[in-house]
Image (cartoon, rainbow, N blue to C red):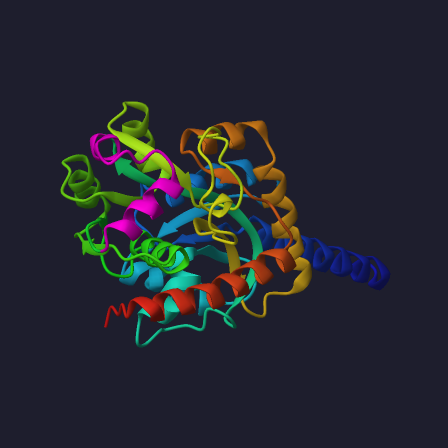
Amino acid sequence: MNARHFLFTLVSAAALLATAQAAAQQQRPIRLVVPYAAGGPIDVTARVLAERVKDSLGTVIIDNKPGAGGNIGADAVAKAAPDGLTIGIAATATHAVNPWLYSKMPFNAAADFAPITQMVRVPNVLVMNAETAQRLKINTLADLIAYAKANPAKLNYGSGGNGSAGHLAGEMFKKDAGIFAVHIPYNGGNPAQLALLSGQVDFNFDNLATAAPNIRSGKLKAIAVTTAQRSSALPEVPTVAATLKGFSIDTWWGLVAPAGTPADVVAKLNQAFVAALHTPETKTRFASLLAEPVANTPEQFGAFMKNELVKYEKVVKATGAKVD
């Protein structure tokens, strides 16, 4: 072998090695941290999207890290290497409520994450026990407000606990409507729903996916949805905002990477996940959970989360709720 041939062989081998290393880097799976237990709506939607992006991004492995209201999983994302190989879920609780609910947070919700895209919006709905609504002649939100004003402190509402989504929505409603209703916290959403069904409480703000079966069966009366627009799942039910201008509160979640993740990497992730959110298969699967896909740019999702953080500061502080 002459020197020229040897040099050519050496350069070729180096090029092949570099190509192999780049391919290996690309083939490394992406870890998607879900800060809640497996089986819930957030976990299910994450798995749906992980399946849809495998052709464009490769394997995406779901890593469930529940605990501390979602803070443990979110913190794992905040402290991961900003290389695009670890991403996670940002949700109403982790990025808008918990920063005001917990005295000490392991991460900075406003600074430690790079937004990728919102994924989902799940409407909440103000529901009454159907028999109670009939007895009190309450058919609309205006009726409910009028009754509450004429009968101070006679109405009560349940929630899954102090600082829960239902509690915060109830306090926002009371403030905007200028009424008083007694809050009764329960240990979780299911006990709160059972209390409403049995007539122990008069109304709740519940997740639409949870409340829908009892609305359809006639046990609960849907008074209004809390999203800015009507829900496609309950198109006949008006919004709270139709009566109380500007009222908007719903459950949302989306995808984030650690702060410092390169813009081109974030853009690639955004492109893949937005495409997955637009597929008919995703829309059908999300619809079964009464969840609405929401795809947007990193900038739009970042601005949205910033606004939500500001909004919930006022709500949580008004309730006086604290976890620790």
Q: Vertically, is 237 above or below 3? A: above
Q: Nearer the viewer, residue 202 or 86?
A: 202
Q: Nearer the viewer, residue 292 or 20?
A: 292
Main secondary structure type of the part rendered in magenta? helix
Q: Is residue 76 visible?
A: no
Name the image quarter holding the C terminus.
bottom left
Tell whether 85 sits left or right of 72. right
Q: Position of residue 231 (x, y in %)?
A: 49, 35
Furthest residue toward front? 150
Q: Position of residue 322 (x, y in %)?
A: 26, 70
Tell whether 193 sits left or right of 209. left
Furthest residue toward bottom? 104
Q: Is residue 40 visible?
A: yes
Q: Vertically, is 12 above or below 314? A: above
Q: Residue at x 68, y 53 (%)?
A: 19
The residue segment tinted magenta is: 131-152
Q: Residue at x 55, y 69 (%)?
A: 259
Furthest residue toward right? 4
Q: Is residue 112 magenta?
A: no
Q: Position of residue 34 (x, y in %)?
A: 39, 52
Q: Nearer the viewer, residue 120 or 257?
A: 120
Q: Is residue 149 magenta?
A: yes
Q: Quadrant of residue 77?
A: bottom left
